[in-house]
Image (cartoon, rainbow, N blue to C red):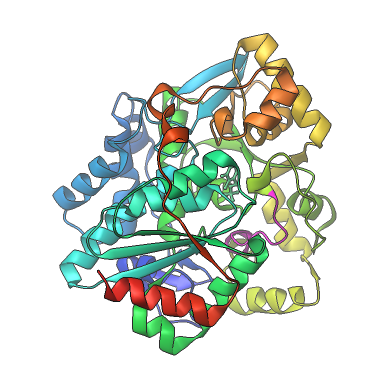
């Protein structure tokens, strides 16, 4: 299995190389050269299997000869053993034909654990075999940083540095990043906002001496291995609702388009998905794009679903690549136009996108009202991101079962949930003591030279 860039001008890589590289050298994103398919019989045979067994069968064709079957099975087993639910991605019912896929039973209570836990094990295995070390530096507004720390903590061949804006993440998010006491984990509270953290990260990647010197690696959501991990739960869920003999639709709370793009890959592989519905909060660039065929950047307005507050939806580039007949030049041109703030999508490409995707949005008030009504009607407590999904899912019900993805545990966003339903959601019992654990964090100035020196010193000290 070979991986090519969406901009058509970067080296063709193996799965392992694409995973360790992250972003392609031409600025594009890696995608498989061809999408492997599963037959109706292959899909029917998934019925009743464990999440891990389904994960193995769905992902195996994408990794090529990077691992033996036993190696890959071991990687998958280690990735998901820390989840607190035997089904890993259990379903609950919200209404006559509306289901909720709970993706928050991993170690940091958000769906990012599904991909990050797997990528941690994949990195560790590949690096140990190559006898290499890498330094992972990430910038986070909350969920990604904690998921990365949890996935890479204690691994021998990796140091992980997470930059977060000092004073601007929730108490729980901060505790999740500062309480792990492993020597390879470095939580850095930077003076500045999230954009400053991201800018510092970008500067480090653009400083090639530094990048090569510390072997910088990226695990943000454009890494193909993260998308691949998320394809699995579309299969496990659809099969438990009757696929391949019955179609299923999904509504996905969307920011960077990674999660919903995984659903699109599942469909391309042969899973009978009827509709994939994009659900956005008030930062609705994707909903507007589906409506108007114009992708226009506007300022981000902070919302109660902060993990979806984005201005540029990175993984949408992968959908565009397919919609433009896999023409890397066409995609490169669109991304060039975007530097001016917007691009228009051709009629043909728009038809392809609309063939697969619907969209909707939820305002702040609608999100709060959905948290309240879901609790009254079903007893389920939704996080604000999941509530955005449920609101849009409700608008797209049909005779086909609708599954909305619940992307985080409500206790990660206690203030918004309490405001919506008058009750503060409790942390799961095994995390109840987290707020009392000692923190380990280094306050850092917004200064590239200082950050680079600190990272080099810490690595040298290990
Ligand atoms: C990251 C995140 C999202 C958005 O997912 P994308 O793959 O970026 O579309 C939604 N909800 C939560 C809780 C998240 O952490």
Quarter holding the C terminus is bottom left
Specify start and end residues of the magenta stretch as a single range: 309-319
Q: Is residue 41 above or below residue 90?
A: below
Quarter holding the N terminus is bottom left
> Is 314 part of what is drawn in magenta?
yes
Q: How many marks?
A: 0
Residue plotted at (51% across, 51% down): 144
Name the one closer to the observer, 452 or 38. Answer: 452
> Is 116 part of what is drawn in magenta?
no
Task: Please state the horizontal and vertical placement of residue 341, each as a whole percent of the image.
Answer: 80, 71
Tell me where residue 292 sits by quadrant: bottom right
Q: Is residue 162 above or below residue 53?
A: below
Q: Is residue 7 visible?
A: no
Q: Main secondary structure of the magenta part?
A: loop
Task: Please state the horizontal and vertical placement of residue 252, each as a whole percent of the image.
Answer: 61, 39
Task: Please state the horizontal and vertical placement of residue 328, each as a whole percent of the image.
Answer: 58, 76
Residue plotted at (36% across, 26% down): 87
Tell me where residue 318 sits by quadrant: bottom right
Horizontal arrangement in the rendering, residue 49 relative to residue 360 (left or right): left
Name the one closer to the observer, 85 or 449. Answer: 449
Task: Please state the horizontal and vertical placement of residue 347, each as a whole percent of the image.
Answer: 78, 62
Horizontal arrangement in the rendering, residue 55 relative to residue 242 (left or right): left
């Amino acid at each position: 299995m070979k991986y090519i860039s969406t901009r058509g001008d970067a080296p063709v890589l193996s799965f392992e190389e694409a995973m360790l590289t992250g972003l392609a050298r031409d600025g594009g994103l890696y995608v498989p050269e061809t999408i492997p398919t599963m037959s109706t019989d292959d899909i029917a045979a998934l019925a009743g299997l464990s999440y891990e067994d389904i994960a193995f069968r769905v992902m195996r064709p994408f990794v090529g000869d990077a691992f033996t079957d036993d190696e890959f099975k071991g990687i998958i087993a280690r990735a998901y053993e820390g989840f607190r639910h035997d089904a890993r991605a259990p379903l609950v019912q919200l209404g006559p034909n509306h289901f909720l896929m709970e993706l928050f039973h991993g170690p940091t209570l958000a769906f990012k654990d599904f991909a990050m836990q797997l990528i941690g094990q994949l990195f560790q295995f590949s690096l140990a075999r190559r006898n290499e070390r890498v330094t992972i530096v990430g910038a986070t507004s909350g969920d990604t940083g904690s998921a990365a720390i949890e996935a890479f903590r204690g691994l021998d061949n990796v140091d992980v540095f997470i930059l977060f804006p000092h004073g601007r993440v929730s108490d729980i998010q901060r505790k999740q990043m500062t309480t792990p006491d492993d020597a390879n984990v470095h939580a850095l509270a930077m003076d500045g906002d999230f954009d400053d953290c991201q800018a510092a990260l970008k500067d480090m990647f653009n400083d090639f001496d530094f990048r090569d010197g510390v072997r910088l690696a990226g695990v943000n959501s454009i890494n193909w291995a993260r998308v691949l991990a998320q394809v699995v739960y579309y299969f496990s869920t659809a099969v438990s609702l009757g696929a391949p003999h019955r179609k299923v639709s999904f509504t996905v709370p969307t920011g960077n388009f990674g999660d919903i793009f995984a659903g699109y890959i599942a469909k391309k592989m042969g899973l009978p998905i009827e509709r994939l519905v994009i659900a956005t909060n008030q930062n609705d660039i994707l909903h507007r794009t589906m409506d108007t065929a114009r992708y226009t950047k506007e300022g981000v307005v902070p919302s109660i679903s902060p993990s979806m507050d984005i201005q540029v939806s990175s993984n949408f580039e992968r959908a565009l690549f397919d919609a433009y007949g896999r023409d890397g030049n066409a995609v490169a041109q669109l991304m060039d136009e975007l530097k001016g703030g917007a691009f228009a999508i051709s009629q043909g490409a728009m038809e392809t996108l609309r063939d697969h995707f619907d969209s909707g949005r939820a305002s702040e008030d609608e999100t709060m009202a959905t948290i309240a009504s879901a609790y009254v009607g079903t007893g389920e407590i939704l996080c604000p991101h999941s509530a955005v999904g449920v609101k849009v899912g409700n608008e797209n019900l049909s005779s086909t079962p609708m599954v909305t993805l619940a992307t985080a545990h409500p206790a990660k966003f206690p203030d918004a949930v309490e405001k919506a339903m008058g009750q503060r959601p409790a942390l799961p019992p095994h995390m109840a003591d987290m707020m009392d654990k000692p923190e380990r964090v280094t306050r850092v100035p917004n200064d590239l030279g200082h950050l680079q020196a600190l990272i080099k010193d810490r690595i040298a000290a290990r």
